Image (cartoon, rainbow, N blue to C red):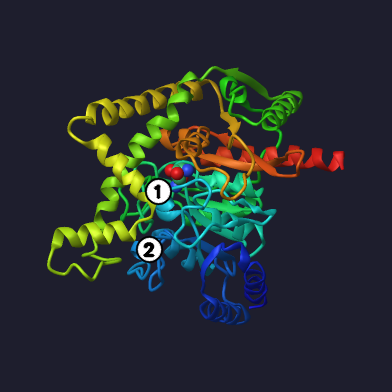
Amino acid sequence: MEAVRYYLGKIAEKSHLNAWLEVFEAEALEQAERLDKRRSEGHGLAKLHGVIIGLKDVICYKGHTVSASSRILQNFTSVYNATATARLLAAEAIIIGRQNCDEFAMGSSNENSAYGPVKNALDETRVSGGSSGGSAVAVQSGSCMVSLGSDTGGSVRQPADFCGIIGLKPSYGTISRYGLIAYASSFDQIGIFAKNIADVSLVLGTIAGPDSYDSTARQKAFVQPEKSEDFTRKYKIAYFSNALNHPSLDASISTQIKGLIQKLRAEGNEVEPVDFELLDYAVPTYYVLTTAEASSNLSRYDGIRYGYRNMDQQNDLSLLYKKSRSEGFGPEVKRRILLGTFVLSAGFFDAYFTKAQKVRKLLVEKTNQLFNQFDAIILPTVTTPAYKIGEKKDPIEIFLGDIYTVYANLVGIPAISLPLFKNEEGLPFGLQVMTSQNNDLLLLSLSKQLMKIQAFDRENAG
Ligand code: GLN
């Protein structure tokens, strides 16, 4: 109860950051009271007993609004729980509210929300990152312990990087997508924000695993080892030399990651450069395939079945569709539906969609080859630290900023952003780490080790 009160206070104190679209105040207090009672009666405690969690506004919570931060779903109420939500509740977590994001999870700065941008708590003139900006800032500003977001091309890792916290995108299929509003189904994955790896692991262990409602969820049970980690293990790590020397990469990011590489070597790890030229194709491939999937997924918002409807067009069905969709969707979502419809259209299908699928396959093959030789890949998470709200207007420029994150979604591997660095201005940025598909546990133990190495160094420096 005390904990819920504390976090409700924090949410109110930080409300100007615009991270929360709705706070379930009365409900969270009631749930806390129930849990307190169970505890005092001596019942056993479930895994997430009393853990206070926020949900990105794309994850269904039965009886609560879920709008994807879009006007088109403004008054839509979830009719069932997402599997992730159901598992959180069964583990006695307390869901405290619904978090702002880019509309339908499309964006990199949370400036595409119908409810306004989320401000970065470290510098309120800067973006939070996106699309799960609200979820990142909620954890960053201490308004909840953990958030669930979604990551189709970086939407958990990129805002985590901008906000100086941890953001994990598990392997594709680790967490059921049932009850996650679809953006691009072959890329989408629920992800976790927290301030330490232990919390990330605990939540992942609770919500991951097979689900009969999602045939793309991995069939094998997700089992975490009982024994404690081996911190003496040495790793074989690859880094993409073309990525670290990329013209779009901020100099300070490049220098500090190179410094970390030296440190890792000094600790006895093998860290090798790899020329991964296909990386330059990742962004175009991602934006062809995801917009194609989005144009299909978003066709269900037609003004008839659910969501916003233009009420002036009751006698003309075609006009009703057009008006409802034109008024319900924001500009970025419209851009992507148009782009996706174009790449799927008869005359252009082979030139764009089929070609992009081939590149995706090639990326998977090359990645598998890499993991025959290496345990992990390290990369920057983003090309620059958080920029100013309103600073970037050119969509292509924004798309290109996703170069390091979309890769993991294209090939389905797990990836995490770890808050290891700060630039001269004190802005945080992350290190991105990836392992082979379904090797999420290895990713988490390596992450713990990396957090330790860097923390030790920070202490020594300070
Ligand atoms: N920035 C990427 C995009 O706009 C990623 C979005 C996401 O992961 N949901 O598509």
| Above or below, comparing residue 186 to residue 141 in the picture | above
Q: Is residue 23 left or right of residue 84?
A: right
Q: Residues within 10 Å of mark 1 (few under 14, many from 20)?
A: some
Q: Real-space Cα distance between discs 2 and 1?
A: 13 Å
For label 1, the residue is: 332
- Between 133 and 276, the residue placed more toward the observer is 133
Residue 68, image x, y percentages: 41, 59
| Above or below, comparing residue 185 to residue 18 in the picture | above
Residue 178, image x, y percentages: 35, 56
Ligand number 1: quarter of image: top left
Q: Is residue 54 left or right of residue 271?
A: left
* Label number found at residue 423: none
Q: Secondary structure at mark 1?
A: helix
For label 2, the residue is: 71
Is residue 58 in view from this perspective? Answer: yes
Q: Residue at x 57, y 25 (%)?
A: 243
Q: Quadrant of the N terminus?
A: bottom right
Q: Residues within 10 Å of mark 2 (few under 14, many from 20)?
A: many
Whether label 1 lies within 8 Å of ligand 1 gets the answer yes
- N-terminal of the pair, mark 2 or mark 1, is 2
Amino acid carrying mark 1 in the image = Glu
Query: How many marks are shown on the rendered structure?
Result: 2
Amino acid carrying mark 2 in the image = Arg
- Between 199 and 355, the residue placed more toward the observer is 355
Q: Secondary structure at mark 2?
A: helix
- Between 276 and 112, the residue placed more toward the observer is 112
| Above or below, comparing residue 247 to residue 447 in the picture | above
Residue 110, image x, y percentages: 51, 52
Q: Residue at x 66, y 60 (%)?
A: 141
